[in-house]
Amino acid sequence: MPPRKKQKVEDPTPPTPPYSKAAPPKPPAGVDVHKIIVGVDFGTTYTGISWVSSEGLNVKSLDEVHCIRDWPGPKGDADYSWKTPSRVAYGSENDGDINVWGFEVLPKMKSYAWFKLLLDPEQASKFDDPGLNTSEGQGVLAKPSYKSAVELCADYLCEIAAFAHKYFVKRPSAEVLAATPLEFYFTVPAVWSDKAKSDTLRAAQKAAKMAKLKVHHDSQLFLIREPEAAAIATISSLTFGGSTQQIKAGDSILICDCGGGTVDVTTYEIESITPKLSFKGLVVGTGGKCGSTYIDRGFIKWMEQKFGDAYMNLSWQKRGPASRLMKDFEGHKRDFGNSQDPDKYYKMQCFMRDAEDSKYYDDDGVVRIYNEDLRKLFDPVVAMIIGLIESQLEAEKRQKKGKVTIKTIILVGGFGDSVYLNDKLREWCQKAQIRLICPEHPQAAIVRGAALSGLQQIQPTSRRARRHYGFCFSLPFDRVRHRAQDKYIFAWDGSARADGNLCWEMAKGDLIDEDTKLTSSFHSLVYEDSPGSHSSTIYSCDLDDPPDHIRVPGAKKVAQMKMDFKSLDLTQYQSRWHNGRLLRKVDAEFQIHFGTRRGVLEFSCVAGGKQIDNATVSFDGQDGAGASSGVGHGSSPITVVASGDTEKGTSSAPHKAAAA
């Protein structure tokens, strides 16, 4: 008979070493199969697409990396055509038969915007916009009740992918395209959590399937961090032909990627310019959700303060993200800074029935916002961006024992095109004796860099871990050091153990290269007549000083890995009789691969010297349980299951067998 009281089963083994190295198959040095490489800069406010043929391996100019600029729908402003709005309206919610997206979304439609940020709702930093979580009522950061964040993003990306496919059909020919595989590189903020990156890849996979794109399974869908894509594009543009006049090997550069929703600040050291660009992460990057949408929310508050109910009572089509008012304001955001005249004002069309004529409004339905008003909206954002840059310089100073080697800042991203932001950063850089470079078309740098990365197989030779990673483990129970509720009896030898202890096997700031993996070895006790499975949770911590126990705030669950023992030959493991049943002690390990080309954590499970194909993994809180995650590492993909709690070396619920 099985015991009435279930107790945790664990072998008192020490934690594994910090992390070990493996040599998974390396990507090819060059592109040996003709394909079209597509970069997709999926942004909070706008999305861009670039493409390049693999036949153009030795590009001589960024102009050879093409950008789609002919988007469907009324653009109204040629500058917008580098990208299309990240906005979608469902036909079922707008008395229509089909979904519309981008510029095709009209003010009268119920639509969704800024939904990319829903993929990472909990990841926070001290530089985040404090009003971000209260924006749902303003027509942004919302989703249909019948859609998850992944599904909403997938629906939008499906429209993007289908349009890109139609665009490519017109270029070579439908026949050539039918025989040419597509390889996609989707950009993600570097500040995002591992779950958010995984969910972005899941959304891309769903979109590719819905759009029926010619991709081989999921092996031709990749993620690339936005500052890395920006670095590849801008450094390449400054060094084409081997030029070292502006940047040379040994230089340290800071990439400041200012987008709509997020700002990423990352520092790299240039290792080589020729024959191939090579660079590495210098210090742990930083960032926050303080992009240009912060200014949009400030403008909405300004309208509420100036016009009260006259503005608040407007219909969705007159004040929502696709309204004429917000489109006019978007154009003025870019122009602000060209004039220092305090009396200069910017006009926006917005008829409000009950608004009184004033300095800010006339009876023709024109809203006026003055230079001083805009300055008050911009300055908090600029201050946060400068704060991020200063924190990066301080991090480098600490690492290099008081020496600062960063002499160049490269400003990219859609918000990087702002005249006011450029002027303020240039003033700050002059005082700090740092050169500021803003490339031509900074809003296109990231999307072009994404495609260029895929074409030339460029990625940093190493990065810095942005957080600590580790597992739970147990220690011999000590009634002085440990709490009674952490005590359990280890069934194999009857010893008292204390669980919930955290072992941080990778430290924040550690170097990560393409071969880096973290290994968690464990021993699990299973009954031979019902072997079941073993689960383990990987934890992370963003703090500089991580906690030593799961009950202390700071540790976050990243993912749960589950290994099914039913396919194992249990006769190869140690055994002993327990309550009339044969108990086996299974030696196995989970492996987490960090520097993968696909841009997400990948997992594998090994027992008896062989990889376990029926292992599963789920990111904590991930929706869509049961669907393929596409984040597997090895011969078979690891699939998504429901999340749950577990500790290192502790069998999951059905197998916590022990004698009472």
Image: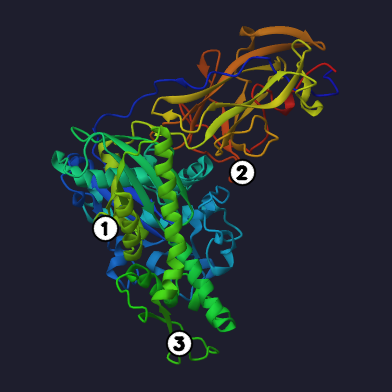
Kindly identify which residue carries mark 1.
441
**Residue 109, image x and y in percent?**
49, 73
Q: CA distance from mark 1 to mark 2?
A: 38 Å
Q: Quadrant of the C terminus?
A: top right
Foreground: disc 3 or disc 1: 3
For image coordinates 76% across by 10% down, the residue present is: 493
Please tell me whether mark 3 sits on a helix, a strand or a loop. Answer: loop
- Give the percent coordinates (x, y) of residue 644: 67, 36
- The quarter of the displayed image where residue 373 is located: bottom left
Secondary structure under tag 2 reads loop
Q: Which mark is residue 621?
A: 2
Instruction: Tell me which numbered mark, 1 or 2, is placed earlier along the sequence.
Output: 1
Amino acid type of the residue that numbered disc 1 sits on in the rendered structure:
His
Q: Which circle marks residue 520 in the picture? A: none
In three-dimensional space, the C-alpha distance between marks 3 and 1, rounded to whole angstroms, equals: 36 Å
Q: Amino acid at mark 3?
A: Lys
Q: CA distance from mark 2 to mark 3?
A: 50 Å
Which disc, if any, is residue 359?
A: 3
